[in-house]
Image (cartoon, rainbow, N blue to C red):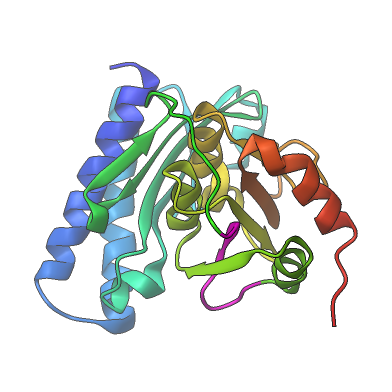
Amino acid sequence: MNDTELARAVAQEAGALLLAIRGEGGTGRALGDRGDAEANALILERLRAARPDDFVLSEESVDDRARCAASRVWIVDPLDGTREYAEGLDDWAVHIGLAVDGRPLVGAVAVPAMGRVFATDDPVRPRGPCAPLTIAVSRTRAPEIARCTAQAMGAAMLAMGSAGAKAMAVVDGRADAYLHDGGQYEWDNCAPAAVAIAAGLHASRIDGSPLVYNCENPLLPDLLICRRAIADEMLAAIAASRCG
């Protein structure tokens, strides 16, 4: 398998495992912890078997800083949206990303409750604007900058769970943009950014600077994914964003 085929297969298998675990019953923290741990173990096993010379940065594993000198690093979140998963909601995801020389080059995002895996080898499809303009934001901690930007642009806000689910809402046209500020890590957005870029979307920091991965500190706190046609307008609105 090439890298994208591998990412897609691993994301799909981990998603199926997580559905099976949740199907056994249980809720709350214990369910989320089990899902995180078992999906992480599966992903690590599959990636290490298929790409033994690559490094892996996972939310659920101890960080091996030797990765910082590597060209190829898989950046994964075995269960993005643990709260949604544990509460029986649908908007959680599995992220399998590959950064090459710091760039989000390959990715697959499984949204198992939708029965979908979005990947960087999917065909690019034209996407028209939503009516009204729609910005996907966090259900539990929507950033103030998103509220101000939506107000400035006359946009609606679509509240959702995991970062992957929100990013894929832009990829499949349910939203025009996904805007986040205030606390993400590389595993939260590497795979979603890779998929979005491959789909012809804009993906950057909220100041317009490039997304860079495999940094010594994996904190990557802000993100904008949107249709290219509105990227300049959104970045300007973010820069000027002030509201009461």
Q: Is 36 displayed left or right of 127 in the figure?
A: left
Furthest residue toward top: 2
The answer, for residue 206, to whether it is visible in the render is no
Rendered position, 223 above or below 191 = below
Q: Residue drawn at (81%, 57%), measured in percent from left and top?
A: 238
Identify the image quadrant of the C terminus: bottom right
Residue 13 location (% of width, % of height): 21, 43
Rendered position, 22 above or below 212 = below
Q: Is residue 172 magenta?
A: no
Q: Residue drawn at (25%, 75%), measured in percent from left and top?
A: 88
Identify the image quadrant of the N terminus: top left
Q: Is 34 displayed left or right of 218 in the figure?
A: left
Residue 171 location (% of width, % of height): 47, 42
Residue 32 location (% of width, % of height): 32, 72
Q: Is 38 displayed left or right of 218 in the figure?
A: left
Rendered position, 168 above or below 82 = above
Q: Give the range drawn in magenta.
A: 132-142
Residue 23 location (% of width, % of height): 11, 68
Q: Does the magenta stretch include residue 135?
A: yes
Furthest residue toward front: 131
Quarter occupied by residue 229: top right
Mark count: 0
Q: Residue drawn at (44%, 25%), measured in percent from left and top?
A: 124
Q: Choose between 8 and 58: the one closer to the eye.
A: 8
Q: Residue drawn at (71%, 49%), measured in percent from left and top?
A: 217
Rendered position, 203 above or below 81 = above
